[in-house]
Image: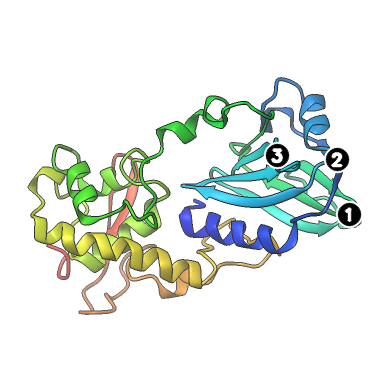
Amino acid sequence: MPELPEVETVRRGLNQLTLNQKIIGGDVLLHRTVAHPDSVEKFIEGISKTNITTWRRYGKYLLANLSPVSSPSYLGVHLRMTGQLLWLNRDTALHKHTRVRIFFENDYELRFVDQRTFGQMWWVEPEVEVEKVITGLAKLACDPFAPEFTVAYLAGKLKTCRRPIKTALLDQSIIAGLGNIYADEALFLSGIRPETLCTNLKLAQIEKLHPAIIQVLTKSIEAGGTTFSNFLNVAGVNGNYGGEAWVYNRAAQPCKVCATPIQRTRLAGRSSHFCAECQN
């Protein structure tokens, strides 16, 4: 958390609010939030006097192209567990968990707020390969919304995997961006138990799982993501998918399809929610 829908919601908000406005400086309140370069002074100097030309998403990573277009540098962000990017007037009182502030010439700023302090930011210099600085990008698999994410792709990734399907879906080298919430939801819609071994899945099950993944992600993006604890969009608004969830965070509540109480178990240290009647 945040997962793909939350990060995509943030990306869309950032593209609406922050583009083509000059960055005039910033302030780093927690130095370890900046993963690159090796000093916060270089980070602030690097992003200053640039404009953000677009924000892109790679799995759960955000990457901003900074002007000039002919030789761009990049601002990378990973929200991790509790990170928030908030677009605020510079006079707005600082939240105690504010880690980085990026100042724009219109008296607004982009604040990175992160309670657990696992989030990271990077400034990647012009003509430097982004994946060599933000090394997690090189490990990402296919995005669920990419044309390459087909039933054949998913079946190929799962056929030799000897882990439970729920655990495999959380592996960013199998599918980029999927996390605990939407793995539970997709498995419910496809009728697959979370502990089912990937090697035991039939092609018919994978053919159900593939569109279920896209369906739950699309639905959550339309709802602005999920807020169970910390997630806010760039305007500080909660996501609304939580009230529509089929199984996630609904332990002991009746299944919306068959009324069987939703069960909660743990796999590889992560909670999993499922309906014993609908998933088999």
Taking 266 as reference, is 17 left or right?
right
The residue that label 3 is drawn on is 70
Amino acid under label 2?
A: Lys
The residue that label 2 is drawn on is 49
Relative to 169, residue 242 above or below: below
Disc 1 versus disc 3: distance between alpha carbons? 31 Å
Residue 268 x %, y %: 29, 39
Taking 73 as reference, is 101 left or right?
right
Q: Secondary structure at mark 2?
A: loop
The residue that label 1 is drawn on is 90
Residue 254 x %, y %: 28, 76
Q: Can residue 121 be seen at all in this image of the molecule? A: yes
Q: Secondary structure at mark 3?
A: loop
Disc 2 versus disc 1: distance between alpha carbons? 18 Å
Would you call the spot at circle 2 few (<14 residues within 10 Å), some (14-19), or many (20 or more)?
Answer: some
Amino acid under label 1?
A: Arg
Q: Secondary structure at mark 1?
A: loop
